[in-house]
Image (tube, rainbow, N blue to C red):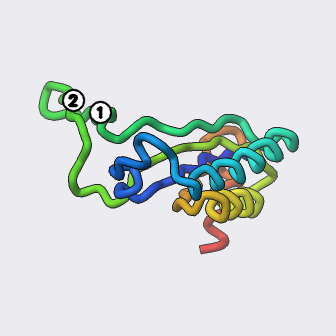
């Protein structure tokens, strides 16, 4: 089953001048741990794709209003966390997805949201998720 892991970072980390120019020693250590973990997931065949995302100020949001689509830009002052990266994994089920996400959180410290990806096995994935709530 495929799952989307969404990693959120506190906005303050994006806004500090050090984070924008030169990663801290802690960030470099976390990236190294995550890179090793990525390699392991690739070797097991569970990693489909993963990427970091650009600064929130480069984001655009499109909304339908009346008869038009309106584009707005960021950054948005009310943000406390920003979507920093994503990964698509293909694993044996919800429990494994949680296990993988737990390792991501341990490695980089960010909050991770798990979302099942709609596909052939989506119904089974939803059933597994709902049985735990």
Circles 1 and 2: CB distance less than 8 Å? yes
Looking at the image, which is closer to me, 23 or 8?
Answer: 23
Determine which quarter of the picture holds residue 98. Answer: bottom right
Q: Nearer the viewer, residue 31 or 92?
A: 31
Q: Label 1 neighbourhood size at 10 Å, few (<14), some (14-19), many (20+)? A: few
Q: Which mark is residue 41?
A: none
Question: Which residue of the protein is positioned furthest toward the right in this rendering?
Answer: 44
Q: Is residue 128 visible?
A: no
Tell me if 59 is positioned left or right of 66 in this view. Answer: right
Residue behind mark 1 = 60
Residue at image location 32% in from the left, 33% down from the top: 58
- Residue 16 image position (x, y, % from top left): 35, 52
Q: Is residue 9 above or below residue 38?
A: below
Between 27 and 91, which is closer to the camera in this rendering? 27
Rate crowding at label 2 as few (under 14), some (14 to 19) or many (20 or more) other CA atoms within 10 Å: few
Q: Is residue 124 left or right of residue 17?
A: right
Q: Quadrant of the C terminus?
A: bottom right
| Relative image position of residue 6 (x, y in whole percent) | 53, 50
- Which residue corresponds to mark 2? 71
**Most foreground residue, 44 or 84:** 84
Q: Secondary structure at mark 1?
A: strand
Residue at the top extreme of this rendering: 68
- Percent x, y of residue 26: 58, 58
Q: Left or right? Give the position of 83 relative to 78.
A: right
Does the image show residue 93?
yes
Cα distance between the residues tagged 1 and 2 = 7 Å
Q: Residue at x 65, y 41 (%)?
A: 88
């Amino acid at each position: 089953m495929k799952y989307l892991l969404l990693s959120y970072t506190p906005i303050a980390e994006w806004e500090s001048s050090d984070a924008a120019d030169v990663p801290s020693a802690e960030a470099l250590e976390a990236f190294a741990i995550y890179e090793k973990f990525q390699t392991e997931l690739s070797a097991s065949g569970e990693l489909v794709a993963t990427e970091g995302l650009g600064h929130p100020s480069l984001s655009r949001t499109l909304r339908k209003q009346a008869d038009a689509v309106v584009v707005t830009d960021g950054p948005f002052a009310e943000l406390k966390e920003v979507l920093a990266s994503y990964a698509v994994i293909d694993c044996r089920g919800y429990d494994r997805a949680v296990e993988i996400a737990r390792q991501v959180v341990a490695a980089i410290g960010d909050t991770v949201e798990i979302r099942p990806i709609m596909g052939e096995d989506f119904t089974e994935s939803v059933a597994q998720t709902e049985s735990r709530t």
